[in-house]
Image (tube, grey):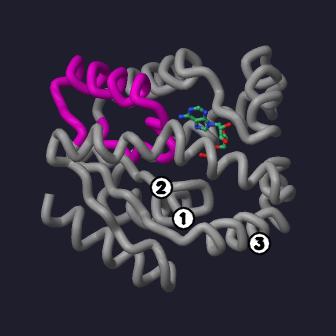
Amino acid sequence: MLNLVLFGPPGAGKGTQADFLIEKFKLIHLSTGDLLRNEIAAKTELGIEAKRLMDKGFLASDSIVISMIKSKLQENFDANGFIFDGFPRTVEQATALDHLLEEKGTPVSGMLCLCVEKEELINRILHRGKTSGRSDDHDVSIIENRIRIYNEKTKPLTEFYAAQNKFYKIDGMGSVEDIANRLIETISSL
Ligand code: AMP
């Protein structure tokens, strides 16, 4: 199985690139942001609680996102592999993912980290906000909070995966196609 962690700050292009990669490598796309937005749209109790945090740019609780991923892994037992997009975001989530995949007898193949400059991240998110309908894509102070939380809680995962020799840094600047080609080249070498 090919299990890819697509990593990077908000606005790095993870969702856009995941769309290419699922086609190319026939993988299942698991985005915890999308799963949480589905809960919000369905107005579940979990969704109402998650929206409160997401709207301010804070993370949802580890236990919620871990259990969502766990059930998706169980549902897709015959998959070719998975692209994890926006997950893991904390060391606790990364550790849980390792355990969940261990139970399936298949490890994380690689963590692909898209590097993009902060100014470009903010521009991309504001641009996306014009059509995304996402309440966390409009306000610069909320976007900056999301980037700050990424730097504090999520970025340390680069070391977590580097310690397992699974960290791959990808230049996330340039055209969507160029970035996709860089990702494909790295994934093909895994
Ligand atoms: P995303 O769609 O990945 O940009 O995520 C949007 C928002 O959903 C984040 O700012 C968090 O509030 C929440 N979220 C998504 N994935 C996670 C996760 N793995 N852990 C905690 N919160 C998450």
Q: Whole-percent x and y of residue 96?
A: 36, 21
Residue 171, placed above or below residue 175:
above
Q: SS for tag 2?
A: loop
Name the residue that disc number 2 marks.
8
Q: Which amino acid does label 1 sit on?
A: Gly
Q: Is mark 1 within 8 Å of ligand 1?
A: no
**Disc nearest the viewer among 2 and 3:** 2
Residue 88, placed above or below residue 2:
above
Q: What residue type is labelled 3?
A: His
Label 2, label 3: how far apart the Cα atoms are: 18 Å
Name the residue that disc number 3 marks.
127
Q: SS for tag 1?
A: loop
Q: Do the residues labelled 1 and 2 touch (CB within 8 Å)?
A: yes
Name the residue that disc number 1 marks.
13
Q: Is residue 90 left or right of residue 60?
A: left
**Disc nearest the viewer among 1 and 2:** 2
The reply to whether residue 119 is visible in this rendering is yes
Residue ID at (23%, 62%): 187
Q: Does 43 appear in magenta?
A: no
Report the span colored magenta.
79-108
Q: In which quarter of the image is residue 84?
A: top left
Which label sits on residue 28? none
Q: Is residue 111 left or right of residue 130?
A: left
